[in-house]
Amino acid sequence: MTDSSPKTITIATRKSPLALWQAETIRDALLQLHPHITVELLPMSTLGDKILDAPLAKVGGKGLFVKELETALLDGRADIAVHSTKDVPMALPDGLTLGVICEREDPLDALVLPLALDGSAPKITSLDDLPVGAIVGTSSLRRQCQLQQLRPDIKCESLRGNVNTRLAKLDAGKYDAIILAAAGLRRLGFADRISYSIKPQHLLPAVAQGALSIELRSNDAETQALLQPLHHFDSALCVLAERAMNCRLQGGCQVPIAGFAELGPDNSLTLEGRVGAIDGSELLIEQHQIAFTLNGDSDIDNNMQRVIQAEQLGETIADRLLARGARALLDQAYDNQ
């Protein structure tokens, strides 16, 4: 006798408003695709959520926002976990896989200024519009090293908490400006708070910034099949190239590494990678473009070739950065934590 009860998928998620929004978005998409299933949320706090009195780089370690979620997957309390892919370590625990990378949203960083007296959000057109000696809130060493390289006069100060908390600290006068991921602001309905979307040539995004991903048990073919329509292949190619670069550099999300890939209309993929000194005194930049070479017998074969070549591009950029001294800069960043 078979069990006729509907399949239930339990989503492990952090408790922050942004994480819950992301998990609810995936839940709603699954229910629209598969009305016969049930989807539940399992909210939980991670180490990164609990330690709010120190910069993430000082906390150290990798996977500060995902380890507890992965434990829930491994012990069966949850079936999938929804992540901001930039928070996901390069190496996953045995038995887990990053089965889906969703369509990437705005990958850029956003500069946010305090609300004006009339409640409006001021706009600027360049980082040069910030006053000399401006205090900018960010706990990202990636942002800090690039900002200090552009504007050595700027003072970067630690900024932790969820998006609402960070905006409240800004509006309370603790900073002249803060920098947040544009995707997070847009997802939570704060797009109007973006004073300036920082161009990639000035502030290259974090690896996989703006892309949600779904982690699940490697042997759960049934759930993988249900999730498959949410996978966005073009976004995945870019994210996989960036993550391959980060993996070769042995980087996490708390080190001064930036990476951003874009697909071109001519069957090309361009990746730029950066590694910098925290104080902005040195910034290594490498960029390379490839044209995909495809000779498979099917779309599946050709897509596999695209993935392999995208990851090879990431490794090429990493090797070029390492050849120019990236390891010493990264070791210095780790030593300062």
Image (spheres, helix red, strand yellow):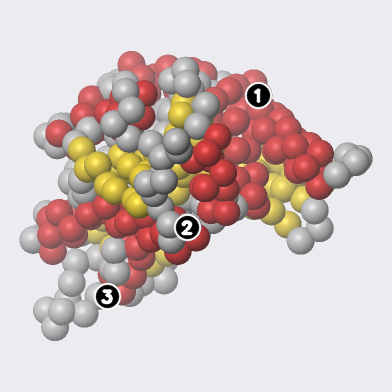
Classify mark 1: residues with Cα within 10 Å, few (<14), some (14-19) or many (20+): some
Residue 205 vertical position relative to residue 61 in the rendered view, above or below = below
Looking at the picture, which amino acid does disc 1 mark? Asp
Identify the residue at the far left of this view: 172
Question: 8 left or right of 120?
Answer: right
Q: Which label number is shown at residue 34?
A: 2
Q: Residue furthest front?
A: 1
SS category of the residue bearing label 2: loop
Whether residue 109 can be seen here: no
Residue under the point 47% across and 57% down: 34
Q: Residue 123, how many percent across, how many down?
A: 33, 74
Which quarter shows the C terminus? top left
The residue pinned by badge 1 equals 319
Query: Can you tell which quarter of the image residue 307 is in?
Result: top right
Q: Which residue extends farthest bottom? A: 118
| Position of residue 220 in the picture relative to residue 55 (left or right) | right
First in residue order: circle 3 vs circle 2: 2
Return the x and y of residue 269 as percentages of the image width and height: 72, 48
Q: Nearer the viewer, mark 3 or mark 2?
A: 2
Nearer mark to the viewer, of 1 and 2: 2
Q: Name the amino acid type tagged 3.
A: Pro
Residue at the image position 75 percent from the left and 37 percent from the top: 304
User: Please, what secondary structure does the residue beneath circle 1 have?
Assistant: helix
The mark found on residue 221 in the picture is none
Say which of 62 and 36 sits in front.
36
Q: Amino acid at mark 2?
A: His
Q: Position of residue 126 (x, y in %)?
A: 42, 66
Instruction: State the residue position of label 3.
Output: 122
